[in-house]
Image (cartoon, helix red, strand yellow):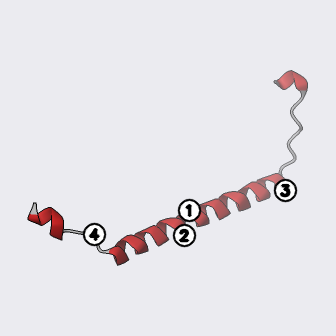
């Protein structure tokens, strides 16, 4: 039980990993939004008709 008491994750490393993960998620979200805008602006999709549902 003494080992479990002394072993702790370094908080700086955990924070750095969390920051990297947040940056990655933000970058992915931004890229997704940009891709969506580009696709919307470059392609003219017909509006879904009632029969398509």
Q: Which residue is mark 2?
A: 23
Q: For mark 3, what is the residue? A: 41
Instruction: Estimate the spatial distance between the alpha carbons at disc 2 and disc 3, rounded to whole Å.
Output: 27 Å
Secondary structure beneath dot 3 equals: helix
- Where residue 2 sits: x, y (%)? 10, 65
Residue at (11, 65) in percent of width and height: 3
Badge 1: residue crowd in 10 Å (few <14, some 14–19, many ≥20) = few
Badge 2 vs badge 1, beta-carbon distance below 8 Å: yes
Question: Label 4, on which residue?
Answer: 9
Which residue is the site of mark 1? 25
Q: Position of residue 6 (x, y in %)?
A: 16, 70
- Marks 3/4: CA–CA distance: 47 Å
Residue drawn at x 19%, y 68% as measured from the top left: 7
On screen, residue 48 versus residue 29, left or right, reads right
- Left or right of residue 15: residue 6: left
Question: On the picture, is 10 further left or further right than 5?
Answer: right
Nearest-to-viewer mark from 3 and 1: 1
Q: Earlier in the sequence, mark 2 or mark 4?
A: 4
Marks 1 and 4: which is nearer the front? 4
Residue 14 relative to residue 42: left or right: left
Per the model, the C-alpha gap separating discs 3 and 1 is: 24 Å
């Amino acid at each position: 039980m003494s080992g479990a008491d002394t072993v702790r994750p370094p908080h700086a490393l955990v924070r750095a990993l969390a920051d990297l993960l947040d940056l990655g998620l933000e970058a992915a979200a931004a890229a997704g939004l940009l891709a969506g805008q580009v696709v919307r602006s470059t392609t003219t999709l017909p509006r879904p008709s009632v029969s398509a549902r």
